[in-house]
Image (cartoon, grey):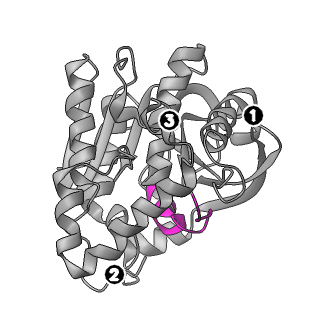
Amino acid sequence: MNAPQDSRTLAADAVRVRELEVAGEQGPLRARLYAAGVPSKRDTLIVFFHGGGFVEGDLDDADGFLRHLADASGSQVILASNYTLATVRPFPAAVEDAHAVLLWAKKNKTKLGWNGKRMLVAGIEAGANLAAVCALMSRDRGAPKLDGQILLMPMLDPGLSSCSMREMPLCPDKEKLADGCAAAYRGYLPNAADRTHPYASPLQSSRLKNLPPALILSAEDDPLRDEAEAYGAKLASFGVAATVRRLLPTPQQSGDRNECACEAPALVEIAAFIASLGGQEAPPG
């Protein structure tokens, strides 16, 4: 994140970060633990998955954002995990990894400094797809219990059929991103039949009842905007508490998909959402 060295940036630099390994579906995965404040067992664990369109990306992509998020409250700990990229094994490898990480976290509370009270799943872009799917899988498989899902600019529609996705190629500076989404889905879902599977495209699911509350953040200039907002509306129609917010456009000249997630309004929305679940004090204002 390109930001001045204000007090928020300096505080985020003081967040304790620890490298570790977690268990994926077929083997160990690199992960990173973020915590701030006085060391203790926190009530809230957020398990976060990075973006990269299923075909690239790693733990460093959202490192700045996660440092700021960890610093926003001393009552939560954040576990960011890698997952198998589609260039190694396509769908459903990534989602199976993501769900396995949740199960591992539930069994390793002491190692994470978490008391096991409240677990949320989160992600950005492709990672937000995995987070949304983990909510479905955890419901369908009966574990682990999730208390919330935080979806940042989620990829939810392999058909790329939304108005915002179709219109963005008309904007030269967004054409590359729209084309990248199409290429990402081709890599992740080489079998066309998988494109309607609810674990690949949660927006296509007709079974969205009994899911945890969701915070969905879209961005004004993002091709993924409409599908994110459509998913929020669909969750609500199934009786799921869904808070949908549209953020301001990403800063000009920024090529970082994590940039808007680092902005203060997004952090305030996330803090307020966690507070609504009983996870921390509500932010001022």
Identify the residue position indicated by label 1 in the image. Answer: 110
Q: Secondary structure at mark 1?
A: helix
Tell me, yes or no, if residue 162 can be seen here. yes
Identify the residue position indicated by label 3 in the image. Answer: 193
Identify the residue position indicated by label 2 in the image. Answer: 254
Q: Label 2 is placed on what type of residue?
A: Ser
Q: Label 3 is placed on what type of residue?
A: Ala
Tell me, yes or no, if residue 70 can be seen here. no
The alpha-carbon separation of the residues under discs 3 and 2 comes to 36 Å
Q: Label 1 is placed on what type of residue?
A: Thr
Q: Nearer the viewer, residue 121 or 84?
A: 84
Q: Earlier in the sequence, mark 3 or mark 2?
A: 3
The crowding category of the residue bearing disc 2, from other C-alpha atoms within 10 Å (few below 14, some 14 to 19, many at least 20), is few
- Give the x, y percent position of residue 73: 44, 49
Q: Nearer the viewer, residue 215 or 168?
A: 168
What mark, if any, has residue 71 been given in the picture?
A: none
